[in-house]
């Protein structure tokens, strides 16, 4: 009896019908993608979802009413870890990445959707700290693997054909995303330019990927290309 | 911390124009809790283990790739040498375990799963013998499984009986995949001094001294090194070249360190090592042969090639060792022939012969890699070729490996296109004089004097 949900199991389910994931079962990334494509909502025991409707398919290989398969024992595989991995990655893979609709096309969120700046400190998942878990044992190591005060710094680079308003467009785009420009450098070589901006994104309400995707949408094949990268890339490569 | 424009644009140039990338992020996975009484149960446990531990590997690696703008070309899994699971099962054929690995690899979206392996430097156990007997069928019936067998170490000497056996397996594997030009052999390596934490396919495995799970990272970047040689110019002396390569290797390796460490953090898995190997691909400019030619040689394989390769290999290690907290794996310059268009051209032009390649392996990190030979070369000759390469590794206290491709029905001078990363194999002629008498002797080669280091 398996306790890992794979695409094999998802294929057997009826399209569009929610599926109650048995407690302890693990779901592969590919299975999640397939379920999404087939519009099958995966109701996980801890997700607070509704119980499955009576027509919901049963877990593959399990008769109706049978006890759920036992949880895959992490302890047998991760002797050194005292926590299951699910706690190390908040929300699991399903909750990573940009929030659907948020920052799409650089539209400022509706005022009512944005919490007042002074109302409360930003929730912990804001800014680039939402990228993933941090482990204290790496803090302060020489290669900058842990959190630091520049954790939310990104480098925005635009390269392309020069024309008026390029810098204004970039700055407006960054402002829409609540980025705070720390440094600007621009050079014109012949008919081309390159602009490098260091931006503090700690006040952005989306995560890094949302910021990156939104800003890189300013790129046009015949105009200029925008790249957004963590400052850490340059720190690793050019500083000891 | 302000960065100079030059530094930022240099990083972009490396990625965009010089194909800097991370060759592989490899999840090492212990299967030591998967041994069961039957091969079917063991295969099911292996499948479940890979699915459970590797389910987020590809997505996480892609997220890191997007965050830092450094392409991560391959995501792979390496498992405990499967021979260790083969002793306890009731059946002889371990192919179902390979098939379970293949199925799980496909499910989680990794391109290869290494570790259908055995370590037999001083003799074989029942599990080792079962695994070796199952290799040909396993490689023929799977797409993503890679197999390796370690037949010697400097401390143990060479198990020449195993070399002879592996020569048979290589021929058998080529024949079983004859309809696909013997591609099975591209997934089969014979090792001397195999390393436990190698993230590169086809020799990746998760050694018995490693933790439950680990993320190892392999860097790439021949294109970047080639550009540096061009920038240094034809008048710089060899010391200046070595210095320029060293600095570049540092930068390349830092990217491996960053990407590997970040991937491991997000997966909640310990980070292991960065493998410093400069790995070529068939892509234009991504070639070790072109770096060697950049030293001032007309073709790779010309006199001076070994000197150039030795300087390159040493400079890469010096730069890389400073850039990573822990360096491991094979760490050096790979010279796979079919995967490097510069090497393919050198073979086609007659500049690079098998014997020269063999000599080059004394100073590079790996060995005879992705070398196509005529399909009718005898098992005895292949066994002797394995023995030669193993001896180079044993005496020089280094890893050497052999990944020979006897192409069924092909003769020297023919070529075979495997496609993708495996590239184009140019069939190389093999010395026609025989070594049958030596091969018939078999036995265990005693360890050399330099093994006595305690």
Image (cartoon, helix red, strand yellow):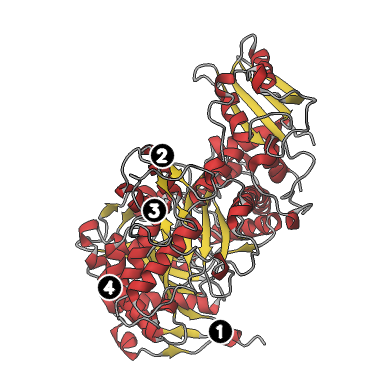
| Residue at figure coordinates x 38%, y 43% from the top left | A53
User: Depth-wise, is mark 1 or mark 3 nearer the camera?
Assistant: 3
Query: Which one is earlier in the sequence, the residue at label 2 or at label 3?
Result: 3
Q: Chain of mark 2?
A: A
Where in the figure is residue B370, as x and y percent of width and height? 38, 60
Work out how far the residue at label 1 is from the one at label 3, CA to CA, in angstroms: 44 Å
Where in the figure is residue B430, as x and y percent of width and height? 31, 68
Work out how far the residue at label 2 is from the one at label 1, CA to CA, in angstroms: 54 Å
User: Depth-wise, is mark 2 or mark 1 nearer the camera?
Assistant: 2
Work out how far the residue at label 4 is from the one at label 2, CA to CA, in angstroms: 59 Å
Q: Chain of mark 4?
A: B
Q: Which mark is residue B432?
A: 4
| Residue at figure coordinates x 55%, y 49% from the top left | A46
| Residue at figure coordinates x 34%, y 75% from the top left | B39
Answer left or right for B434 relative to A113: left
User: Depth-wise, is mark 4 or mark 3 nearer the camera?
Assistant: 3
User: Which of the two residues, B330 or B415, is positioned nearer the viewer here?
Assistant: B330
Q: Which mark is residue A36?
A: 2
Q: Secondary structure at mark 2?
A: helix
Residue at label 3? A6
Work out how far the residue at label 4 is from the one at label 3, CA to CA, in angstroms: 52 Å
Residue at label 1? B155
């Amino acid at each position: 009896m398996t306790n890992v949900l794979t695409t094999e199991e998802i294929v057997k389910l009826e399209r569009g019908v929610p599926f109650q994931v048995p407690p302890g079962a693990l779901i592969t990334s590919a299975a999640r993608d397939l379920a999404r494509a087939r519009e099958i909502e995966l109701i996980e025991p801890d997700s607070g979802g509704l119980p499955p409707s009576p027509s919901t398919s049963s877990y593959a290989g399990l008769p109706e009413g049978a006890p759920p398969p036992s949880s895959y024992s992490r302890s047998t595989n991760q002797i050194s870890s005292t926590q299951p991995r699910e706690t190390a990655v908040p929300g699991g893979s399903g909750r990573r990445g940009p929030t659907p609709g948020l920052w799409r096309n650089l539209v400022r969120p509706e005022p009512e959707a944005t919490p007042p700046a002074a109302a409360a400190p930003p929730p912990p998942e804001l800014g680039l700290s939402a990228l993933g878990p941090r482990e204290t044992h790496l803090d302060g190591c020489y290669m900058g693997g842990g959190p630091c005060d520049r954790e939310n710094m990104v480098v925005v680079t635009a390269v392309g054909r020069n024309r008026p308003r390029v810098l204004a467009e970039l700055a407006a785009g960054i402002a829409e995303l609540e980025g705070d420009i720390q440094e600007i450098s621009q050079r014109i070589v012949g008919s081309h330019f390159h602009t490098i901006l260091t931006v503090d994104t700690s006040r952005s309400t989306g995560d890094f990927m949302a910021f990156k995707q939104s800003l890189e949408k300013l790129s046009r094949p015949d105009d200029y290309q925008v790249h957004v990268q963590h400052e850490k890339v340059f720190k690793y490569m050019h500083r000891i | 911390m302000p960065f100079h424009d030059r530094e930022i644009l240099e990083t972009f140039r490396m990625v965009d124009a010089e194909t800097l990338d991370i060759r592989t992020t490899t999840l090492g996975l212990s299967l030591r809790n998967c041994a069961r009484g039957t091969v079917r149960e063991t295969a099911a446990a292996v499948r479940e283990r890979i699915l459970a531990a590797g389910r987020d590997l590809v997505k996480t690696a892609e997220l890191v790739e997007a965050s830092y703008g450094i392409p991560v070309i391959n995501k792979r899994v390496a498992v405990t040498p499967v021979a260790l699971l083969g002793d306890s099962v009731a059946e002889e054929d371990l192919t179902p375990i390979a098939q379970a690995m293949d199925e799980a690899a496909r499910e989680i979206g990794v391109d290869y799963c290494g570790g259908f392996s055995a370590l037999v430097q001083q003799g074989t156990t029942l599990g080792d013998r079962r695994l070796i007997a199952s290799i040909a069928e396993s490689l023929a019936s799977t797409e993503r499984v890679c197999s390796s067998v370690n037949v010697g170490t400097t401390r143990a000497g060479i198990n020449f009986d195993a070399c002879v056996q592996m020569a048979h397996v290589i021929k058998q594997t080529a024949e079983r995949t004859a309809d696909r030009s013997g591609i099975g052999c591209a997934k089969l390596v014979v090792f001397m001094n195999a390393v436990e934490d190698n993230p590169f396919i086809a020799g990746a495995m998760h050694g018995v001294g490693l933790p439950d799970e680990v993320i190892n990272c392999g860097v790439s970047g021949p294109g970047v090194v080639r550009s540096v040689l061009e920038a240094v110019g034809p008048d710089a002396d060899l010391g200046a070249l070595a210095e320029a390569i060293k600095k570049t290797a540092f930068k390349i390796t830092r990217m491996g360190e960053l990407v590997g460490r970040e991937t491991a953090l997000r997966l909640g898995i310990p980070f292991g090592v960065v493998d410093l190997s400069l790995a070529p691909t068939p892509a234009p400019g991504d070639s070790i042969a072109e770096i060697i030619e950049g030293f001032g040689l007309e073709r790779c394989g010309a006199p001076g090639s070994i000197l150039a390769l030795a300087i390159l290999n040493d400079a890469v290690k010096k730069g890389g060792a400073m850039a990573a907290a822990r360096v491991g794996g094979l760490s050096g310059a790979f010279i796979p022939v079919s995967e490097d268009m510069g090497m393919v051209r050198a073979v086609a032009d007659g500049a690079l012969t098998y014997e020269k390649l063999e000599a080059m392996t004394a100073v590079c990190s790996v060995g005879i890699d992705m070398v196509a030979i005529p399909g009718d070369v005898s098992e005895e000759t292949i066994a002797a070729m394995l023995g030669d390469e193993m001896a180079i590794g044993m005496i020089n206290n280094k890893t050497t490996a052999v990944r020979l491709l006897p192409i069924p029905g092909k003769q020297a001078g023919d070529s075979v296109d495997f496609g993708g990363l495996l590239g184009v194999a140019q069939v190389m002629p093999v010395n026609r004089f025989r070594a049958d008498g030596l091969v018939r002797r078999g036995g265990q080669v005693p360890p050399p004097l330099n093994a006595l280091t305690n």
